[in-house]
Image (tube, helix red, strand yellow):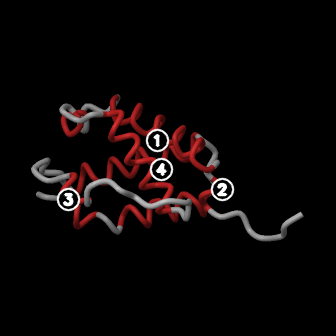
């Protein structure tokens, strides 16, 4: 029996748990009229795969994020601070819904908040 603490990647349920959180997250996005326009032309299957990869890497999982840079991925979308904050709010709610603990949620949101300057392009 190991006494080592469970890290955020394990707390989220590894890749299967992260995939569940990402699915819940995008269901919330799809129901938010203020955000759907940002995703109108997106390949959602590809986007989900990239976000799972990004979140897994952000919380100490195996592998690395191999998608485009955040600046490149969001180029031309004119994402506002308000939209960015709404997205983080939906992610927070999705993580709560899949049973993530407060520490893990804070780590995920802190990691993604650090990407604000690359994503927001007002």
Name the residue beneath numbered marker 1.
Answer: 22
Q: Gap in Å between the C-alphas at discs 2 and 4?
A: 17 Å
Q: Label 2: few (<14), some or many (≥20) within 10 Å? A: some
> Which tag, 2 or 4, sits closer to the chain's start?
2
Name the residue beneath numbered marker 2.
Answer: 10
Q: Gap in Å between the C-alphas at discs 4 and 1?
A: 11 Å
Q: How many marks?
A: 4
Name the residue beneath numbered marker 4.
Answer: 92
Quarter of the image for residue 38 reads: top left
Name the residue beneath numbered marker 3.
Answer: 120
Q: Label 4: few (<14), some or many (≥20) within 10 Å? A: some
> Which tag, 1 or 2, sits closer to the chain's start?
2
Cβ atoms under marks 1 and 2 closer than 8 Å: no
On residue 91, the disc is none
Determine the residue positioned at 41% across, 44% down. Answer: 90
50, above or below 9, in the image: above
Q: Gap in Å between the C-alphas at discs 4 and 3?
A: 19 Å
Kindly report which numbered mark, 2 or 4, lies closer to the viewer in this rendering: 2
Cβ atoms under marks 4 and 1 closer than 8 Å: no
Quarter of the image for residue 11 reads: bottom right
Q: From the viewer's perspective, is 6 left or right of 47?
A: right
The kind of secondary structure element at disc 4 is helix
């Amino acid at each position: 029996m190991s006494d080592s603490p469970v890290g955020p990647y394990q707390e989220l349920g590894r890749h299967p748990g992260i995939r569940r959180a990402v699915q819940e997250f995008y269901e919330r996005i799809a129901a938010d009229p203020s955000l759907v326009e940002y995703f109108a032309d997106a390949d959602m299957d590809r986007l989900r795969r990239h976000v799972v990869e990004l979140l897994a890497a952000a919380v100490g999982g195996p592998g690395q994020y191999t998608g485009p840079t955040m600046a490149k991925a969001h180029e031309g979308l004119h994402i506002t601070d308000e939209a960015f904050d709404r997205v983080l709010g939906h992610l927070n709610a999705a993580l709560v819904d899949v049973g993530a603990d407060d520490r893990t949620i804070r780590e995920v949101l802190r990691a993604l908040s650090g990407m604000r300057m690359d994503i927001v392009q007002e």
